[in-house]
Structure formats: C-alpha cells, structure tokens
C-alpha cells in the first residue's frame, strides 16, 4: 500500500534525526546510562521531530538490545511497538481527549504494570489542548508515577501548558531545521526515489518548508506527483505550488519604486488570472523587501540571511534604489495586509488597496504612519534622481529688478528691494494696460505686510537656495536633507529662518548639529556669518500681529507731519 513520504521516510533511530542533534545526543546518553526521566516535554514548531523522537524514546527504553542508545528495531518488543500490537506504549491526541474523565481513565491504567514491555509509556500529543481539570488530574501522577510508567508530552504552544506541568518534566526545545539540512535530506530522498531535483528547486522547497521536515516531504511529494516523474525544476515547483513568479514580483517592485499604481495593479491582475494565491504572493513580496532591508542594514551578513530564490544582483540594485525608511514602511504595510487577508474571503481587494497606497502615498490617510510612508517615498525619489530641486534661472531669463514677488510656495529668482512699491491692482488679477498708474498716496494707503510675517516674508534668491542645497547634499542625513528641500528659507539680520510644515520636520531640523552645519554652508555662500532658526508655518501664522497693516500707515503719517502716539 502506498505511503506518504513523511511516513515512509520517518527516522527509525536517533542517528537518522537531522537538525536536532542537541536533543538526540542527550536522549541517547540517558538511555545508555539508564538515567531515564519519568516525564518529558517536547516543544517546538510543527514538523521538527517531536513525535518522532517520542516514539524512538519509547522504543529505546523498552528495546531488548539497544545499540548506542538507539532501538534495534529487530527485537519482538520493537516490532510490536512499531506495528501497534503491544499496547503498553499508548499514543494519545489531547485534542480529542481533553476532559478530566479521559485523563482519569488513563491514570487508572497506570496502577497496572506493563504486560509485554519494560515500561508503560504514554505519548500525549498537543498536550496544551487539555482542560484545566485534566491538567490537575495529571499533576500528582506526573510528579510521582510508578517506576514502570513514563510520560512524554508534546506541544507546539508552550505558553498554554500549565507551569505546574512544566516544573515536573524535562523540557526539550526543538528548533526549526536549517534550509541546507532540509535540502540535503530532500536530495537523498529524491535519489532513493529515482528522480532528479534542480538545485534552485531544492532551495525553493527548503524555503517553503519554513523549517519543517514533514512539510518539506509533503511539498516534495506534491510536486513530484504533479510533475509526472520528470526532473523537478524551479518552474515546476512554482507551477505546482501556485505561487507567483519572480517576474511578477519584479514588476510590482518596479511599480512601487516608480510610484506607478497602474503597473502594480496590472501585475497583480496577472497573478490573479494565472490562478496564483494572492496572499502567498504578498508574503513573497514582503520577504523580498525584507531581504532588501538586510542588504541595506547588514550587507556582510545579507547573503547568508537572505531568502533562496531571489536574485542577489536584483536585491543589491533595489537596496540602492529604495531608502531604508521606505523599505521598512513597505514591509510593514505588506505584513498588515497579509494579516488582514486571513480574516477575509478573497483578499484581492485588500491587496489592491495596499498596492495603491504604496504607489500613491498621497491617496492614503493623513495619520503618522502614512505621512512617514509618503516621506520615505519622497526620499527614494531623491536618492534615485527622479526628483530634483529646480535649477536657478539663467541670466538672460531673469526677471527685471522691479518684478513682483513670486507666488506663495515658489522661490523668488532674484533679490528684491524692501522699499519697492507693490504692484498695482489686485495681486491675483491681471493688470489692466489702459489703467493709469497708481499714485503714491494710493500705494501708501494699501496696508503693507509686516516683514516678520512668515506668509509675506520674501525668500532668499533661488540661486542661493540651490547652491545651499547642493553644498549640503551628502552632508546631512537623507531625512534631514529631504525636509530641508521642502522648507521655505528667509534671510534677514544675518539669520536664516527655515519655515517647515509640521512638527516632524521641526524635530528633524531643529537640532544643534544640523543647524550649525546649515549655518556654516550659508555663511560660505552669502559671505557673512549667520545663524539658523527653525520654525513651523503654523507657529509663524500664530505669531503674526493683528496690527501688521497699521505700520506703513503710521510711517506715512509721521512723514507727512502728523503727530501719532501709541498708548
């Protein structure tokens, strides 16, 4: 009768168990020395060998001719335990025997000595599923059982096991198996089965197993049956597992880098129409950006820590194309979406919303997380060269000296005279060519903004700002430099005032070392010593005086000989 690979190739001795050498050696030494405990607790993730080692230990302590702590698997006792004819070794599933009555029935049997073996062994799998009453019924017997009784408990959720149970057992922690060990085991099994596996296919299977030996065998069996017995390639594994190809992932990565939501949605649609699982595709995308983050933060260790199946050259390229905060934001959003898809029926809508948010940060809500993502995306643009500061206009394109100031938010391309009169008429309306020039009295009657007001203060010349930004490129951190490029710069009385939007920008720029660096660069460009002050636009608006418009009126009145006194 056909047997699944994970049953057919289950280890028959402790020496056959791979990836858990720290546990198998200890158990072998205990069996050899005869210092076997009465209670064991095996904990670890699925498929790491807990039940296998429990069965091996049950046979080893009852074996008539043990070999170096291993069961011989030839004596009548070993054969009886393996085929289930000896009932002194009992394997239970705590998920279906959770009640206190089930546990009491088991404990009543412990009063009778074994019939065909040296010890009566109870293997209780998923012991965390026992009820509180069942745990309490087990306590006393577990602490002082008869000398011929042994308990072996196994669990994947150690935190749900009662502390009183833990203190009565010898605990062994099973770790995840290394991908290289899983790959070596799969290669040996493939050789026994008479088929070949491509190295990239081995690496991908080992990664998909996620440290589980049982899962790796199940995946191998699934791929080989679907492949028809031919050589198993990476493409065949991708096809059999229904996961997205690297080309599709690369298209999405490129779309995120270029902030192209249409390209990202089209790539996701191709994945969906090909019948790939969208959730697993987003998991692979998150794993890719995790590897990109490794190449940015730990380049020396990244080749050994990165996931198999990804191109190292592509990872290096994307590590330079994205900023570190941007990668962290992308990975966080992908992981949140993957978690949300577990609670939904399809998951396509969640994936589309996630990609739209990553490719169009301005479409996201205005909370701190989304603002951080927008800032990180801007840093990536600056680093890649797709976003640059506008260059200063050439000499022949400069406006005349009396031209009106630039609109709000634009750099003024030339120095302005503080005494120059404002343009006639409404600033936002086009001038009337037939209208007579405004008289000086009318110009004086027009309230002039106070120089201290941030809304009307004139910025430094555009060429000076460009020169300042060029001199600080690569000197400031990427985050500080990004906020500096977005700030408005005003210079008066040997003070450079940086007006920024939001307190986050103030926190980044208003640091002594950053202010000193900016002040030094400004002094070299302007030719005089200066200081730097950082302020938020909201704070500047609040500090504006309600009597700003009366200052020029009083000035003109005093010039005309009118006596004006302020009480």
Image (spheres, rainbow, N blue to C red):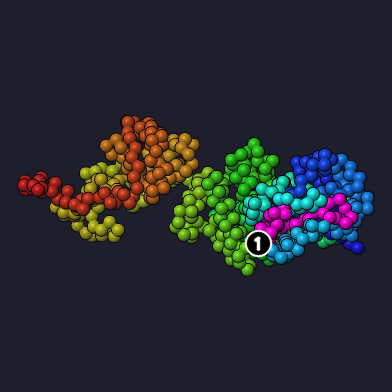
Read off the magenta span: 113-142
Give percent across and percent down for residue 83: 89, 58
Quadrant holding the N terminus: bottom right
Residue at the farthest front position: 111
Crowd band around label 1 with a 10 angstrom C-alpha radius: few (<14), some (14–19), many (20+): few
Q: Is residue 345 visible?
A: yes
Q: Residue at x 41, y 36 (%)?
A: 514
**Closer to us: 153 or 459:** 153
Give percent across and percent down for residue 466: 41, 40
Q: Residue at x 47, y 57 (%)?
A: 362
**Closer to us: 288 or 208:** 208
Q: Using residue 434 as the reference point, say whether residue 203 is left or right of it.
A: right
The image quadrant that residue 113 belongs to is: bottom right
Task: Tell me the SS state at disc 1.
Answer: helix
Q: Using residue 473 as the reference point, say whether residue 149 is left or right of it.
A: right
Give percent across and percent down for residue 37: 76, 46
Q: Residue at x 33, y 51 (%)?
A: 538
Give percent across and percent down for residue 79: 91, 54
Residue at the farthest bottom position: 345
Q: Residue at x 33, y 50 (%)?
A: 537
**Closer to us: 261 or 71:** 71
Q: Is residue 75 above or below residue 270?
A: above
Question: Where does label 1 land, which residue?
Answer: 133
**534 drawn magenta:** no
């Amino acid at each position: 009768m056909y047997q699944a690979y994970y049953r057919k190739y289950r280890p028959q001795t402790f020496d056959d168990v791979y990836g858990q050498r720290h546990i198998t050696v200890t158990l072998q030494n205990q069996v050899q020395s005869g210092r076997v405990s009465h209670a064991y607790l095996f904990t670890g993730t699925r498929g790491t060998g807990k039940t296998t080692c429990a069965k091996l230990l049950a046979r080893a302590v009852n074996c008539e001719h043990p070999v170096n702590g291993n069961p011989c698997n030839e004596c009548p006792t070993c054969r009886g335990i393996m085929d289930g004819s000896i009932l002194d070794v009992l394997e239970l599933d705590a998920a279906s025997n959770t009640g206190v009555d089930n546990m009491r029935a088991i404990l009543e049997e412990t009063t009778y000595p074994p019939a065909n073996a040296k010890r009566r062994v109870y293997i209780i799998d998923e012991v965390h599923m026992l009820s509180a009453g069942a745990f309490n019924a087990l306590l006393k017997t577990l602490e002082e059982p008869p000398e011929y009784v042994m308990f072996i408990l196994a669990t994947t959720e150690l935190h749900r096991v009662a502390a009183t149970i833990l203190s009565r057992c010898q605990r062994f922690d099973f770790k995840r198996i290394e991908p290289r060990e899983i790959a070596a085991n799969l290669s040996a099994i493939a050789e026994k089965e008479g088929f070949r596996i491509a190295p990239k296919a081995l690496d991908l299977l080992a990664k998909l197993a996620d440290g589980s030996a049982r899962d790796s065998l199940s995946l191998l069996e699934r791929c080989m049956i679907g492949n028809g017995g031919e050589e198993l390639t990476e493409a065949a594994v991708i096809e059999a597992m229904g996961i997205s190809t690297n080309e599709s992932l690369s298209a999405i990565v490129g779309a995120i880098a270029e902030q192209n939501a249409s390209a990202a949605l089209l790539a996701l649609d191709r994945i969906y129409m090909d019948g790939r699982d969208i959730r697993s595709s987003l998991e692979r995308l998150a794993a890719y950006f995790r590897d990109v983050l490794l190449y940015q933060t730990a380049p020396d260790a990244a080749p050994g820590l990165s996931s198999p199946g990804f191109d190292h050259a592509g990872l290096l390229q994307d590590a330079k194309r994205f900023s570190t905060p941007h990668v962290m934001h992308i990975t966080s959003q992908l992981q949140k979406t993957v978690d949300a898809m577990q609670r939904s029926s399809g998951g396509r809508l969640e994936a589309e919303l996630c990609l739209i948010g990553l490719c169009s940060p301005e479409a996201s809500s205005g909370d701190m997380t989304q603002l951080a993502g927008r800032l990180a995306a801007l840093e990536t643009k600056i680093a890649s060269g797709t976003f640059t500061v506008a260059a200063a206009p050439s000499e022949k394109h400069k406006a005349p000296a009396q031209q009106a100031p630039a609109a709000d938010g634009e750099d003024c391309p030339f120095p302005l005279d503080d005494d120059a009169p404002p343009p006639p008429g409404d600033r936002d309306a086009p001038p009337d060519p037939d209208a007579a020039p405004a008289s000086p009295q009318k110009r004086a009657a027009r309230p002039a903004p106070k120089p201290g007001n941030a809304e009307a203060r004139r910025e430094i010349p555009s060429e000076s700002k460009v020169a300042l930004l060029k001199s600080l490129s690569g000197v400031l951190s990427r985050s500080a430099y990004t906020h500096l490029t977005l700030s408005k710069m005003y210079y008066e009385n040997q003070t450079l005032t940086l007006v920024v939007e939001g307190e986050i920008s103030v926190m980044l720029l208003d640091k002594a070392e950053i202010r000193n660096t900016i002040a030094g660069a400004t002094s070299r460009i302007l030719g005089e010593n200066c200081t730097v002050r950082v302020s938020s636009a909201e704070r500047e608006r609040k500090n504006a005086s309600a009597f700003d418009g009366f200052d020029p009126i009083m000035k003109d009145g005093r010039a005309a000989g009118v006596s004006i006194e302020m009480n």
